[in-house]
Image (tube, coloured by chain):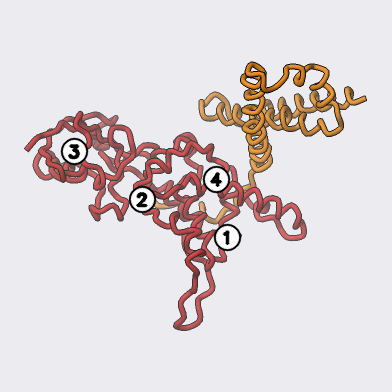
Chain colours: A red, B orange
Amino acid sequence: MPSMAIQLQRYLPERDSTPHWQAFNVEYDDSTSVLDALEQIKAEQDSSLSYRWSCRMAICGSCGVMVNGVPKLGCKTFLRDYPKGLQLAPLGNFPVEKDLIVDMSRFLEHLTAIKPYLIAEAAPQGQPHRQTPAQLARYKQFSNCINCGLCYAACPQFGLKPDFLGPAAIALAHRYNLDSRDSGKAERMAQLNSDNGVWGCTFVGYCSTVCPKGVDPAAAVNQGKIASTLDGVIQWFKPAKASRNKEQR
Amino acid sequence: MPMLNKNASQTTPHRSDEPIWWSLFSAGGVCVAMLVPAITLLVLLGIPLGLVSAEQLSYQRLHALVFHPLGLGVVLGAMVLPLFHAMHRIHHGLHDLKLAHGRLAKWLCYGSAVLLSLLVLGLWFSGLG
């Protein structure tokens, strides 16, 4: 079996003052993923290594790491594609807690703020919410998000300004705003309308490049800019109603 | 994992004034994208290939076009909106390069676009007669 040199960024807060690189050698074949390599290192070489993982099939979104500087899911990235070796580091733009584990609470706060769930009247007893294929097609691609945070590690604006709601949260807000069953758009627009909402994005587009599920958050954010502009114009012409972005701070 | 800030979802942030600047930026971008290739085609290919007579782009003809009452469209499309487009890019570029962000940079960027636009419009109105 061939082996590969892997550089790992280590950080043990009770021992290290700053992160440092440590080299490991792992055996691999065509089916060895980055996550497999981490498991091999932890099982056979250094049991103190910490990383997050769960499903091993690109659906839980836990195992995001920087692979040679690019945000990737460990389970969906294979050593065979990196013949020159690997450098693994924790996801960028997030505070590092330990080794490859980052503190994602800022992202989760943003996600909570935009209410990423269906806000709708319950369907009549025993009846499903009906939706045509055309209504489904409007939001379907944005619903594939698995909250892995790779787009936040890719987003330079989130790096510069962590208050920016960021790609996944805005893509999910957009996903529910576009859903014909949903009536929560007014509650979400207040967040999207702010400087830290859709307007924090300068359309770099790297979020859509790194998304492991083929979601296009950059499109969601920029469609959101049009929605937010229309929302602003409509509020202008409806001065009688309380403006949704004025009252409290 | 640290406790989440539960208040984060309950505060209502201020509405951004960015839609105004972004709309001007977008409009300017569309104008630039339409005009620049057209002008390039006319001047760099049309004239040398003899498809367009240089006389048709003479000072007198262009002057008459711009200072026609409908020439306001030319002034807006070729100068005013592209000014806002450019200053919007510079404003966000300054933030991206960590050179400047905040009120002063914003006032300087959009302020200069407004001043230069007023100058252009003033010259246009004074040249109308």
- Vertical placement of B85 versus A103: above or below? above
Q: Is B109 or B59 nearer to us in this picture?
A: B59
Please report whichever mark, 3 or 4, sits nearer to the chain's N-terminal start: 3
> In terms of secondary structure, where does tag 2 sit?
loop
Q: Is residue A22 left or right of residue A218?
A: left
Write the residue at 16% across / 45% down. Answer: A31
Q: Is residue A135 above or below residue A157?
A: below
Could you give the CA–CA distance between mark 2 and mark 3, rounded to whole angstroms?
Answer: 21 Å
Circle 3: is it few (<14), some (14-19), or many (20+) Cα within 10 Å? some
- Mark 2 or mark 3: whose residue is earlier in sequence: 3
- The residue tagged 2 is A213
Q: Chain of mark 1?
A: A
Q: Which labelled disc corresponds to residue A222? A: 4
Mark 2 or mark 1, which has the lower sequence index? Answer: 1
Q: Secondary structure at mark 1?
A: helix
**How far apart, in angstroms, are the residues tagged by discs 3 and 4?**
36 Å
Q: Residue at x 14, y 33 (%)?
A: A4
What residue sits right under mark 1 in the picture? Answer: A185
